[in-house]
């Protein structure tokens, strides 16, 4: 077959693989990506050997490297990227190749590399410009550990059939299962393990094991990363829990500056499962914004309003009230604005207490005096 024939056939198979992946048939998708990769690698190598010129050579090498990544052939992807960069690819394609190499390295860091995880453990990995050889800004690590713990607590409560806890401590019967233990950070990547539950405690009342809790978290994070919110709503029917999960996932997500990638390695049926969160906080905030535009304002579901009822301000988060479920924002001018906090966002609001923040809020109607919090971000 010619280079064109090989490439076209590879793309046809890759399209089918995309469909299978979106349908949740991951093993079948990986097998198809491998088939597409073999064809695209042939096309790319022929193009390189025959020196057909740029940008064709680097485009084919990049495509083959991307397919290799899709079927977990990290070393093959690395070699193809290096081959492409050793030539003279156009600037834009060279940048895309470097980004792809960063993804390859990230997936390599998600490998357990001799570390054995139990079913109540996860490995968290962050990567980006602000992450060095086994070190990172403390807040980037600590905030994500606390956020992941909150996700676990809320998932335990939701799957136990409890109504969303607006305030107050975790119930005694659940609290002891939400303790967590952190491993030492491993060098060469910012990777560390978290174990949930008391030592020796592997089951929770109403659940087979911790694996079901971790699976629920990672599956739902994957849906947010894929922007498959309809499926997420099927899995998390309670609006408060839905809002909470999306907001907490946003806090885990890359900021696009210090952290570019976030990933989780867990164990399912004895095999390692890798979940990546590459959507950045801004993209997830847009998703939350879209959900809030179509849903009941009190729980971020079923409301219609015009864009001129959405507002954005900056200030210091003060005077939070659990009783009224509200917070005050003190602006630079000294003016104070009180906002109603929807069910589900309380976990996020606590994080920014007494900090400079950027707030997005809405009114239910143009004449409404009640202002409803939509999104909150820290401000440097």
Image: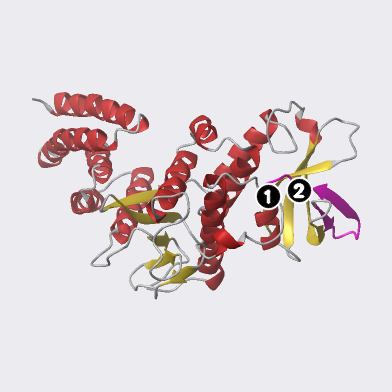
Q: Position of residue 252 (x, y in %)?
A: 52, 55
Dividing the picture into quadrants, the one containing residue 11 is top left
Q: Position of residue 248 (x, y in %)?
A: 58, 52
Q: Would residue 71 be seen by someone viewing this image from the given angle?
A: yes
Residue in view at x 66 percent, y 47 percent = 344
Q: Position of residue 180 (x, y in %)?
A: 48, 67
> Residue 341 got which mark?
2
Report the front residue among 259 and 54: 259
Numbered disc 1: secondary structure: loop
Left or right: 178, with 366 as reference point: left
Q: Are marks 1 and 2 in contact (CB under 8 Å)?
A: yes
Crowd class of label 1 (few under 14; some 14 to 19; many from 20; radius 10 Å):
many
- Indicate whether 287 appears above or below 152: above
Magenta part of the chain: 326-343
- Indicate whether 9 appears above or below 339: above
Residue placed under numbered mark 1 in the picture: 345
Q: Position of residue 137 (x, y in %)?
A: 52, 71
Residue in view at x 38 percent, y 60 percent = 120
């Amino acid at each position: 077959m010619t280079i064109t024939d090989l490439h076209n056939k590879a793309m046809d198979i890759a399209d089918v693989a995309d469909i299978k992946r979106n349908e949740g048939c991951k093993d079948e998708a990986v097998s198809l990506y491998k088939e597409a990769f073999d064809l695209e690698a042939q096309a790319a190598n022929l193009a390189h050997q025959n020196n057909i010129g740029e940008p064709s050579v680097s485009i084919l090498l990049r495509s083959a490297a991307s397919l290799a990544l899709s079927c977990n052939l990290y070393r093959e992807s690395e070699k193809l990227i290096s081959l492409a960069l050793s030539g003279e690819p156009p600037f834009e394609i060279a940048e895309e190749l470097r980004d792809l190499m960063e993804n390859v390295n990230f997936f390599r860091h998600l490998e357990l590399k001799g570390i054995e995880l139990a079913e109540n453990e996860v490995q968290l990995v962050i990567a980006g410009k602000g992450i060095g050889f086994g070190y990172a800004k403390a807040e980037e690590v600590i905030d994500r550990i606390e956020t992941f713990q909150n996700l676990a607590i809320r998932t335990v409560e939701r799957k136990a059939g409890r109504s969303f806890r607006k305030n107050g401590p975790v119930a005694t019967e659940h609290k002891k299962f939400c303790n967590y233990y952190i491993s030492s950070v491993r060098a060469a990547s910012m990777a560390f393990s978290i174990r949930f539950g008391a030592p020796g405690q592997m089951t929770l009342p109403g659940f087979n094991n911790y694996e079901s809790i971790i699976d629920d978290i990672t599956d739902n994070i994957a849906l947010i990363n894929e922007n498959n919110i309809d499926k997420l709503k099927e899995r998390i029917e309670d609006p408060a829990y839905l809002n909470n999960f999306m907001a907490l996932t946003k806090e885990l997500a890359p900021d696009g500056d210090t952290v570019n990638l976030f990933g989780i390695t867990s164990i399912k049926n004895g095999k390692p499962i890798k979940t990546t969160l590459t959507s950045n906080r801004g993209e997830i905030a847009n998703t939350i914004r879209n959900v809030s535009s179509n849903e009941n304002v009190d729980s971020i579901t079923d409301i219609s309003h015009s864009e001129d009822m959405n507002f954005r301000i900056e200030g210091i988060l003060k005077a939070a009230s659990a009783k009224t479920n509200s917070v005050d924002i003190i602006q630079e001018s000294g003016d104070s604005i009180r906002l109603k906090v929807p069910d589900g966002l309380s976990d996020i609001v606590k994080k920014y207490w007494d900090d400079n923040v950027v707030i997005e809020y809405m009114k239910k109607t143009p004449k409404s005096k009640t202002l409803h919090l939509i999104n909150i971000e820290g401000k440097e």
